[in-house]
Image (cartoon, rainbow, N blue to C red):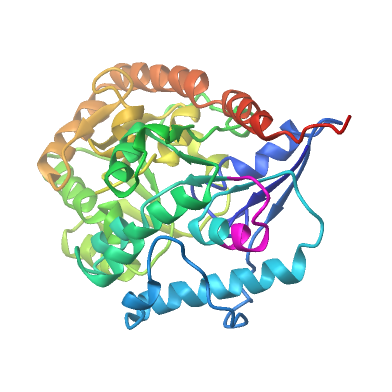
Amino acid sequence: MKLLQALFFPPEQPGGVSSMIPYLQERFHSSRWEMEMFWLPKRIRNKGHEDPVFHTLDWKEFGESPIVAKYIQTYRDYLWWTRLRIQKPYDLIHSHHPIAGMSMKAVFPEVPLIQTVHSSYERELILNGKIREGGPEHRFLTSLYRELEYISDRLVTVSESFKSYMSPYVDQADSIEVIHNGFDDRRFKPVPHENAVPQLVTVCRLVPAKGLDILLQACAELKRKGHDYVLHIIGDGPARQELEEMAKSLGIYQETIFYGYTLHPEEFMPFFDIFVLPSRAEAFGSVFAEAALSCLALVGTNVGGIAEQIEDGVNGLLVPTEDPKALADALEKVIVDPLYRYELARTASDKAKNQYSLSRSVNQLKKMYLNYQPKKES
């Protein structure tokens, strides 16, 4: 069976897709399966001129928005690149981005399409202050869920929480399937270690949606209470300068290390003690599963896929969003009690190995893919 995994970003791009899809090929390597990946290179910009065709909305209604116009142009570029680069047919296409799925269906209308929605672009844009709720960009992006439902043979997402979020925007919400991201646990090698000073780490893009302003305020409260710690912030983004200035103004810059972008943070994540990320929204939160597999104690916000991964007080701690004091209190619990910290980390690791293994996701995908296996000619 010939499969195409259609991405938007290159497979080394950080995020939920890259945590799983590049590692699928090895698991599908057999005489029964043939899998390839496809994505839009960053150098391809403003090449496409073919107007996209939507079946469930009129995109020109929103076309005066620069953000929508950019989205449409990217769609044109993906169409152009797909027509240029893909000649041979596939038995099944599995898309991991709305633009990829819509482009693939336009070029290969007869090929079955599975569409996985990994995150909410409109929620991130709202939280990052780029668009307003209810505005044209928000309406356009939420309209795409029904379009994806229309063109897809199977609509998939990564958490029950995100399935609930998508439900008002589609016609048959019950038909959405949930398949969690899977992680190859061979990538994660917990290291026995004893840090004299607790080491906190977070890994994310530095944007308002990730709530790092709340984390810095919580860390300032920890310092005020006299707790020693080091906070490691791995990732880059438009909010970096603002966050660095905030750390200085809060008097915690000496305790905070900004690393910038790192390709494989899982290689040194096991040397830290506590993973913390107070996201304001998260469809799944792959980095929590990665931190659990690295045997770190988890502290996150009670939102989206994070709350599905963490059972408060059992395999991590959950706090409300926008609450620096609650976050500081949770961090204090795992800072002052190493045994409790270790117990949370061990339980989190066990759950991640059981529920978020790559093998489990591969088995679910194979079962799904076989429903679209071409019938042999008699």
Percent across and percent down for residue 36 are 74, 48
Total labels: the figure holds: 0
* Most foreground residue, 262 or 279: 279
For the N terminus, the quadrant is top right
Q: Residue 283 sits in which quadrant?
A: top left
Horizontal side, residue 22 vs residue 197: left or right: right
The residue sitting at 62% across, 34% down in the picture is 187
Q: Is residue 112 magenta?
A: yes
Q: Is residue 331 above or below residue 113?
A: above
Q: Residue at x 47, y 74 (%)?
A: 72
Q: Quadrant of residue 374?
A: top right
Residue 378 lies in the magenta stretch = no
Quadrant in which the C terminus is drawn? top right
Is 86 left or right of 109, judged from the image as shown? right
Q: Residue sitting at 59 percent across and 63 percent down?
A: 103
Res 188 visible: yes
Q: Nearer the viewer, residue 71 or 198?
A: 71
In-front residue for pair 114/197: 114
Q: In the picture provided, is 304 more to the left or to the right than 10?
A: left
Which range is magenta? 103-113
Q: Is residue 206 visible?
A: no
- What residue is shown at x 86% (from left), y 33% (from top)? 377
